[in-house]
Amino acid sequence: MKKTLAKKPMRTTKYKKAGGRPQVTVANKAKFLKLYEDLNTNISETCKALRVSRRAYYLWMKDKRFAKTIEDIDEAQIDWAESKLRACIDKEEIKAITYYLDNMAKRRGYGKKVEHSGDISITVISAIPRPSKTKDEDEDDEE
């Protein structure tokens, strides 16, 4: 008696074919952009949430309007972070002031510096023991 496997019905999703490539629609891109901003510009989380591959995201980035919108969202995030940093500086928080000076006032001499002179010597310490010389090698050295 042969067993026949029942065919599972195909899922109806937003995908065109079994390959899993999402339809490139204005609505999908708009959803991505909104969620991208809501998730604080995290590409991986946005792709996972919308079930879009990173490859699809990078294909969408070839669209100049989409890429410009992504860039604008990223810049807005940086502006927000800078405003929070400024607020901390206004509260005279020393770590915020130090961070700002280390990164923004390098031309005035602030920042982390690594100074070294022209003479740098390196000592190599070997943890592998050297084999002892045999009598034949000792005799060769003496000659």
Image (cartoon, grey):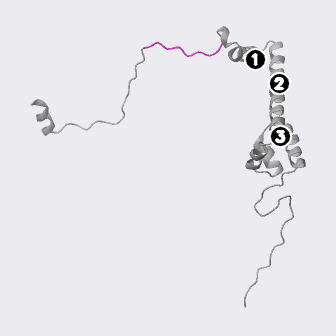
Label 3 Cα neighbours within 10 Å, binned few <14 / some 14-19 / many ≥20:
some
Mark 2 is on which residue type? Asp
CA gap, disc 3 and disc 2: 20 Å
Q: Quadrant of residue 38?
A: top right
Q: Position of residue 70 (x, y in %)?
A: 81, 36
- Which is more foreground, mark 2 or mark 1? 2
Sequence order check: which comes first, mark 3 or mark 2? Answer: 3
In this rendering, the answer to whether 78 lies above or below 46 is: above
Amino acid type assigned to the residue bearing label 1 in the image: Ala
Q: Identify residue for label 3.
A: 66
Which is more foreground, mark 3 or mark 2? 3
Are circles 3 and 2 on residues that touch, CB within 8 Å?
Answer: no
Q: Mark 1 Cα within 10 Å, few/some/many (few <14, many 20+)?
A: some
Left or right, 110 with respect to 45, comes to: left
> Label 1's element?
helix
Residue farthest toward the right in the current orientation of the protein: 27
- Residue 52: image tag: none
* Residue sticking out furthest to the bottom: 1
Q: Amino acid at mark 3?
A: Phe
Residue 60 in picture, x, y percent from top left? 79, 45
Residue drawn where x is 77% and y is 46% of the image: 57
Q: Are marks 1 and 3 in contact (CB under 8 Å)?
A: no
Magenta segment, prevailing SS (helix, strand or loop): loop
Residue with the mark numbered 2: 79
> Foreground residue, 118 or 98?
118
Q: State the CA–CA distance, disc 1 to disc 3.
A: 34 Å
Give the quadrant of residue 82.
Answer: top right
Q: Which residues are magenta?
A: 110-118
Is disc 2 surrounded by few (<14), some (14 to 19) or many (20+) residues within 10 Å?
few
Disc 1: which residue: 96
